[in-house]
Image (cartoon, grey):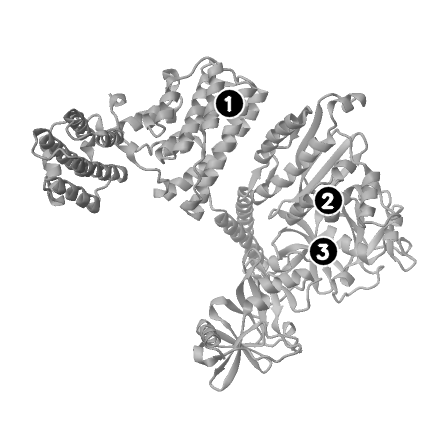
């Protein structure tokens, strides 16, 4: 590793440190930057919207605003699971093509807010082949557990939206 | 008198010139300098630092004359430097310690030791002792301020917004004037516009704009006084001055937003020349215009001649010259002018949006409370009365909130008058624009967006639709071509029509071109209507020679795209040699639409009531299939294709048997479909809410709404639905079942 690369990595690590909301999907623990999170709401009735990708569960009424809900399990090709009382919708704010938009994310359960330091974060592993790690900002090891830090903009933000419109 | 007073800058410049010319031993020039310095002291009374400095400067000169200070070229150079510092201080209008320091150093080097402290102390003391006439001082001072107009950004941005408004009104007024020549009210309006711009720009030290506005104002004043007639020359020049001013104001806006490096010093001389030459032809040039050219910044010179008879009726005009001569802060102009705008206030669109949203919520919450079983169980007549009172109030609030976002389309339409006027001039055709429905209200957010498509279509109608005079005569049409621009509300839509009495579209050539481009198959069975509407396809308009082929189609896809972004539709209807008609259908965004709530499986959808023709449970005799190509419903001898909503939307249905289900017959742009649903739940007024950028382009869904129980219901987009259904069935079935409806 050249000094340059090391410095860059260090830079990224520093940029990544901060507070994360962690949540569970199956056995995996994920984290998203706390600043992106608007609120966490319990499961409510979702209205399905036709002709949309499977991972878009539909829309909900968030105090008069209609916002889309993404099922992260489907988005990540994980088996779907019956909703239960722990199922939550995390409302995040991402950059849409014309300004900020709010999007709900269905997750199995919300865990906690963690302060993750830069020395706890490692770059995303390269699995090679079909596994796309573009969504992952880094891996955090906290108290012996691994948290996958998601780049939420890439999961459901503008980048993802552009892909959606190509469908 | 103020007119005699010369500004400090003038004196300083003169002194600087004299000092440069001075030769050692030529004391007469020093005498002249002394005289100038004396006058400068009088003028510079208001600026204590400067007074002290000039006085010191004068003392040095006196010593030179008396031989106490050496009369050398070197010393004169130093004096020249001192003047440079004086000029600098005069320009910035504040005492700069550094400059003062330099000033003193130079004088000390000459042999006249002086310290900055002495100057700053001596200043006020000496001034107190002297009784120079202060009258002349005040007005001249502000002329020395530099061109830095960025000092007060709030005022500037206010000026920008107002100027744009005013400039727009110029256009509208001018065009009205063309129709009613000699209408003094209109001339006064135009005059006032330039007057206001002149006043504010003068105050903000925007010299070029000020000068141009002033000169134009003079011209209009001559028109008002009857010295000049408002002929097409005058109108042309006023219009082009208006355009140019817009450019200049835009530049200031750019500077404000993107930094001073964007600043462009516009050359207004050609415009000034034109205005003056027009005025000269009339044989009357007010003396102000020439003085002003020399000294554009002079507020006094810029004040218009105010006929005393009108002073009372126009407060802003009578007030402004007075204020500017009494003190140097003509702010009163702003407020006075604002009063003229009428009783309107400007509100941030975001605030308006959140109000509309909140009101929507209020209405929904109210119905939630009312539908609550426990509340509904209360049998109290007072409660019922109160509830109906409450809903009356909320409805009223909602209506008002909605209407605040709506503006008449008039403004947009009026811009078209100018366009047609310019176009007909350019093309040498006589074209008349007849408008109707200008009072139709349209969502504010849409106003800007529809402007470009309108321009495009009108341009097309004038350029290509209306034939040249000779051709028109040979066809027996009236020599003056007509373009109609109409707006009206139809159901949940605003419809804008642009119709011309020209040659119409050349359907055969469009067809040929489209098949050459591979947009359609050569033998595809299409109605004329369908072929004509091919001009909106993107691939079609890229044809470079389309103008020669059909006379139409250039950039029509842009129109379509813009209109579709507004969730609207555009189509063209054409009759050979009779003309063509462009139809723009725009939704009343945010307006409440009336809808029928239907249930399909566990989902509820809203169908716009305006689109619904009838609903029925079909009898067996009405239902038939066209060999496997699709199902149809026969109503009054018409075959209507059936769309199974559950199939299209992938919903688990309750009814799969068409004879047990409910059929809702809908119509969209001449096409009929029977939508198969499980149940009709009722009629409801719903507020359209966007599904957000994420799901905006969902096929068949126009938007969402919050239903009475707080859940989201989807509003069906019938056009999208039918288009999707069309792709699923075959084109042949289309043609079989409804050939008549798509022709006209």
What residue sits right under mark 3 in the picture?
B700
Q: Residues within 10 Å of mark 2 (few under 14, many from 20)?
A: many
Q: Residues within 10 Å of mark 3 (few under 14, many from 20)?
A: many
Chain assignment, label 1? B
Report the mark closest to the observer, 1 or 2.
2
Report the mark closest to the observer, 1 or 3.
1
What residue sits right under mark 2 in the picture?
B541
The Cα–Cα distance between marks 1 and 3, rounded to whole angstroms, is 50 Å
Q: Nearer the viewer, residue B421 or B579?
A: B421
Disc 3 to disc 2: CB gap under 8 Å: no
Say which element carries label 2.
helix
Q: Nearer the viewer, residue A100 or A15?
A: A15
Q: Residue B336's x, y, as percent?
A: 37, 31
x 26%, y 23%: residue: B2
- Identify the mark nearer the N-term, 1 or 2: 1
Residue A164 in sight: yes
Query: Relative to residue B738, is residue B280 drawn left or right?
Result: left
Say which element carries label 3.
loop
x 32%, y 37%: residue: B146
Disc 1 to disc 2: CB gap under 8 Å: no
Q: Residue B563's x, y, as percent?
A: 66, 45
- Identify the mark nearer the N-term, 3 or 2: 2
The residue most toward the bottom is A144
Report the mark closest to the observer, 3 or 2.
2
């Amino acid at each position: 590793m050249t000094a340059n690369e090391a410095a860059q990595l260090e830079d990224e690590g520093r940029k990544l440190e901060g507070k994360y909301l962690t949540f569970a999907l199956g056995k995996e623990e994920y984290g998203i930057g706390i600043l992106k999170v608007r609120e966490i709401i319990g499961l409510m009735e979702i209205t399905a919207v036709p002709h949309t990708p499977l991972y878009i569960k539909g829309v909900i009424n968030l105090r008069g605003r209609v916002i889309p809900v993404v099922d992260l399990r489907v988005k990540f090709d994980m088996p779907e699971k019956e909703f239960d009382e722990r199922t939550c919708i995390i409302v995040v704010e991402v950059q849409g093509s014309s300004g900020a938009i709010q999007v709900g994310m269905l997750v199995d359960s919300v865990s906690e807010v963690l302060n993750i330091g830069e020395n706890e974060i490692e770059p995303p592993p390269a699995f090679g082949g079909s596994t796309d790690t573009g969504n992952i900002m880094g891996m955090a090891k906290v108290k012996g557990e691994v948290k996958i830090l998601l780049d939420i903009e890439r999961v459901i933000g503008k980048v993802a939206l552009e892909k959606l419109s190509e469908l | 008198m103020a007119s005699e007073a010369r500004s400090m800058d003038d004196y300083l410049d003169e002194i600087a010139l004299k000092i440069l010319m001075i030769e050692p031993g030529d004391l007469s020039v020093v005498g002249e300098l002394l005289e100038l310095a004396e006058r400068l002291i009088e003028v510079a009374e208001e600026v204590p630092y400067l007074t002290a400095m000039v006085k010191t400067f004068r003392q040095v000169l006196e010593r030179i004359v008396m031989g106490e200070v050496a009369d050398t070229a070197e010393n004169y150079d130093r004096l020249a430097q001192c003047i440079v510092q004086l000029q600098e201080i005069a320009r910035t209008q504040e005492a700069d310690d550094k400059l003062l320091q330099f000033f003193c150093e130079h004088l000390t080097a000459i042999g006249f030791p002086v310290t900055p402290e002495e100057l700053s102390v001596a200043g006020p003391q000496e001034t107190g002792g002297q009784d120079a006439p202060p009258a002349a001082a005040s007005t001249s001072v502000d002329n020395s301020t530099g061109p830095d107009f960025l000092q007060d950004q709030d005022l500037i941005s206010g000026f920008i917004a107002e100027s744009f408004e005013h400039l727009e009104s110029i256009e509208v007024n001018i065009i009205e004037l063309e129709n009613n020549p000699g209408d003094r009210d209109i001339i006064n309006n135009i005059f006032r516009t330039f007057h206001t711009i002149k006043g504010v720009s003068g105050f903000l030290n925007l010299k070029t704009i000020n000068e141009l506005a002033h000169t134009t104002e003079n011209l209009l004043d001559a028109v008002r006084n009857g010295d000049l007639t408002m002929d097409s020359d005058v109108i042309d020049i006023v219009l082009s001055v208006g355009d140019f001013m817009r450019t200049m104001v835009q530049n200031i806006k750019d500077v404000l937003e993107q930094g001073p490096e964007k600043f462009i010093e516009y050359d207004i001389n050609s415009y000034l020349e034109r205005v003056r030459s027009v005025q000269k032809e009339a044989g009357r040039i007010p003396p102000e215009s020439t003085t002003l050219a020399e000294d554009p910044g002079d507020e006094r010179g810029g004040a218009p001649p105010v006929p005393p008879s009108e002073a009372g009726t126009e407060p802003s005009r009578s007030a402004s010259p007075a204020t500017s001569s009494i003190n140097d802060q003509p702010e009163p102009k702003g407020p006075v002018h604002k009063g003229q705008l009428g009783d309107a206030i400007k509100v941030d669109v975001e605030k308006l949006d959140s109000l509309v949203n909140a009101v929507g919520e209020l209405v929904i919450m109210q119905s939630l409370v009312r539908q609550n079983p426990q509340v509904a169980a209360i049998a109290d007549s007072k409660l019922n009365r109160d509830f109906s009172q409450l809903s009356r109030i909320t409805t009223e609030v909602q209506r008002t909130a909605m209407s605040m976002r709506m503006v008449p389309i008039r403004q947009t339409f009026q811009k078209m008058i100018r366009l047609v006027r310019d176009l007909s001039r350019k093309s040498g055709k006589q074209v008349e624009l007849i408008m109707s429905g200008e009072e139709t209200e349209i969502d504010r957010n849409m106003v800007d967006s529809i402007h470009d498509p309108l321009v495009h279509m009108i341009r097309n109608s004038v350029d290509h639709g209306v034939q040249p005079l000779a051709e028109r005569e040979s066809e027996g049409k009236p020599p003056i071509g007509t373009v109609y621009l109409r707006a009206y509300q139809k159901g949940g839509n605003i419809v804008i029509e642009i119709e011309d009495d020209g040659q119409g579209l050349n359907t055969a050539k469009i067809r040929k071109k489209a098949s050459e481009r591979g947009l359609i198959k050569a033998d595809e069975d299409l109605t004329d209507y369908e072929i004509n509407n091919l001009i909106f396809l993107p691939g079609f308009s890229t044809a470079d020679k389309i103008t020669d082929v059909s006379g139409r189609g250039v950039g029509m896809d842009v129109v379509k795209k813009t209109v579709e972004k507004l969730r609207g539709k555009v189509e063209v209807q054409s009759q050979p040699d009779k003309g063509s008609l462009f139809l723009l259908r725009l939704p009343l965004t945010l307006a409440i639409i009336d809808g029928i709530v239907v249930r399909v499986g566990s989902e509820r959808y809203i169908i716009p009531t305006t689109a619904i023709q009838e609903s029925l449970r079909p009898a067996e005799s009405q239902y038939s299939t066209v060999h496997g190509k699709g199902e149809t419903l026969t109503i009054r001898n018409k075959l209507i294709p059936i769309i199974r909503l559950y199939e299209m939307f992938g919903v688990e249905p309750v009814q799969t048997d068409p004879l047990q289900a409910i059929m809702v017959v809908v119509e969209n742009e001449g096409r009929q479909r029977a939508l198969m649903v499980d149940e009709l739940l009722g009629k409801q007024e719903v507020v359209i809410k966007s599904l957000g950028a994420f799901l905006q382009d969902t096929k068949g869904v126009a938007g969402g709404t919050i239903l009475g129980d707080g859940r989201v219901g989807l509003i069906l987009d019938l056009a999208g639905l039918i288009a999707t259904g069309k792709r699923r069935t075959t084109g042949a079935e289309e043609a079989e079942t409804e050939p008549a409806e798509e022709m006209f």
